Image: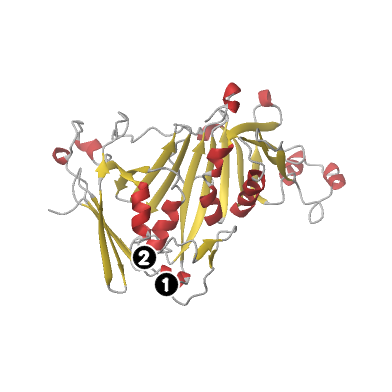
């Protein structure tokens, strides 16, 4: 009998890079679809991370949807909805990451990420360069509902096979037609959308982290400087802030802003110089400032994605839910999206998504995620 899913990637390091971004949780929820594999992790229902391994990352990708009678649950499905319910299960993300680095992929003493998302080899050895790390083959196989996830790694004639146990979730919403319940981001009520280089956010969070804060406050305004401010508070070393303002040396001066006749053009120019997109449109009841608090420790858990990404999209809805979507460029992907051998010099773009629930009222002094990301808004 044909397995439900099988795929081969010639760049095991790419898979490791993406999955490591959400490596803050022990277990991950996996959903296998015809278009790729969805990995999601959460913490206390107030933070969620998502990685989607697109089929374009694999040289071969085969998916055979299980028949309803082959499922190990009692879900009743009709012919129309059967194709929309794909295999879902839990797996040890810690074990999966350990498996992917059996040959030393994640050896921090040999390699590291720079703040701008580039890869740096620190050992200088001829056999530890990124080119060598990218040459490992990874084969994935999921035979039937309830079976183990089989991972086979090959390098220079050496082959290692690991079988990772899969688990059923005790969440009643997990495994249903709609999948698990995600932290809801109201796309029709987005009041803040900011796109900039991920390195700027990464550096700002690192600066604030030095004061050991418990709360991160994000403030954004399209009318008043400094326009975008990240502040850390609640720690033992007082408050600290990183402010992003308009670059008056390279752009228009404040006086020239006042001479603009078109108010719309004026608002368009009033944006931090580091941003590519800066849209802040709060409802009149909120005034001109969007301001929300989040648990700093949770935001910090997205730092690996910040370091690996080239850009980040920050979106906030009217309820204060924060979406951080990171664009990570991986060399050797397929530019046309078809499955096939990697083409030299071509980059594949993948997205890693996080969502955070804001702190409300007394929760600012207490511990305080979940997500289904998408590439909307870029």
Q: Answer with left or right where residue 331 lies relative to residue 319.
A: left
The residue located at (34%, 50%) in the rendering is 95
- Residue 60 position (above or below residue 173): below
**From this viewpoint, is residue 272 visible?**
yes
The front one of 236 and 65 is: 236
Residue 109 in the image: state x and y as whole percent. Answer: 50, 64
Q: Answer with left or right where residue 176 lies relative to residue 135.
A: left
| Residue 103: mark in rendering | 2
Residue 11 in the image: state x and y as whole percent. Answer: 38, 65
The Cα atoms of the two marked residues, 1 and 2, are separated by 11 Å
The front one of 153 and 291 is: 153
The front one of 233 and 305 is: 233
Counting residues from the start of the chain, the first of labels 1 and 2 encountered is 2
Residue 106 in the image: state x and y as whole percent. Answer: 44, 60
Q: Residues within 10 Å of mark 2 (few under 14, many from 20)?
A: some
Reading the image, the residue beneath label 1 is 132
For the rendered model, the colour scheme is secondary structure
Residue 209 in the image: state x and y as whole percent. Answer: 63, 44
- Residue 197 position (above or below residue 292): below
Task: Please identify, in this view, whether the residue under mark 1 or under mark 2 is nearer the observer.
Answer: 2
The front one of 4 and 113 is: 113
Asked which secondary structure carries label 2, the reply is loop
Asked which secondary structure carries label 1, the reply is helix
The residue located at (63%, 38%) in the rendering is 213
């Amino acid at each position: 009998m044909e397995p439900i899913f099988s795929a081969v990637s010639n760049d095991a390091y790419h898979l490791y890079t993406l999955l490591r971004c959400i490596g803050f949780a022990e277990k991950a929820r996996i959903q296998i679809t015809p278009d790729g594999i969805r990995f999601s992790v959460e913490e206390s229902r107030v933070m969620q991370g998502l990685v989607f391994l697109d089929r374009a990352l694999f040289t071969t990708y085969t998916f055979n949807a299980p028949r309803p009678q082959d499922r190990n649950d009692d879900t009743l499905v009709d012919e129309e909805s059967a194709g929309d319910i794909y295999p879902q299960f839990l797996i040890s993300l810690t074990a999966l990451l350990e498996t992917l680095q059996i040959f030393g992929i994640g050896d921090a003493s040999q390699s590291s990420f720079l703040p701008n998302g580039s890869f740096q080899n620190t050992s200088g050895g001829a056999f530890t360069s990124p080119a060598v790390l990218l040459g490992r083959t990874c084969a994935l196989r999921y035979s039937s509902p309830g079976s183990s996830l089989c991972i086979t790694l090959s390098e220079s004639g050496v082959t290692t096979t690991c079988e990772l146990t899969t688990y059923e979730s005790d969440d009643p919403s997990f495994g249903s037609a709609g999948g698990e319940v995600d932290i809801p981001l109201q796309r029709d009520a987005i009041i803040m959308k900011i796109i900039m280089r991920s390195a700027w956010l990464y550096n700002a969070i690192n600066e604030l982290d030095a004061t050991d804060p418990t709360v991160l406050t994000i403030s954004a305004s399209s009318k008043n400087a400094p326009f975008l401010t990240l502040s850390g508070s609640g720690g033992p070393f007082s408050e600290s802030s990183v402010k992003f303002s308009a670059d008056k040396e390279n752009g228009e001066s404040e006086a020239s802003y006042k001479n603009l006749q078109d108010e719309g053009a004026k608002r368009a120019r009033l944006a931090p110089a580091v941003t590519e997109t800066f849209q802040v449109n709060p409802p009149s009841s909120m005034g001109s400032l969007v301001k929300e608090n989040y648990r700093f420790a949770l935001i910090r858990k997205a730092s690996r994605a910040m370091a690996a990404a080239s850009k980040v999209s920050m979106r906030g809805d009217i309820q204060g839910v924060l979406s951080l979507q990171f664009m990570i460029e991986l060399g050797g992907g397929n530019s046309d999206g078809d499955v096939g051998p990697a083409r030299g010099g071509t980059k594949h773009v993948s997205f890693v998504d996080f969502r955070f629930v804001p702190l409300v009222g007394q929760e600012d002094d207490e511990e305080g995620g979940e997500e289904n990301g998408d590439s909307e808004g870029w």
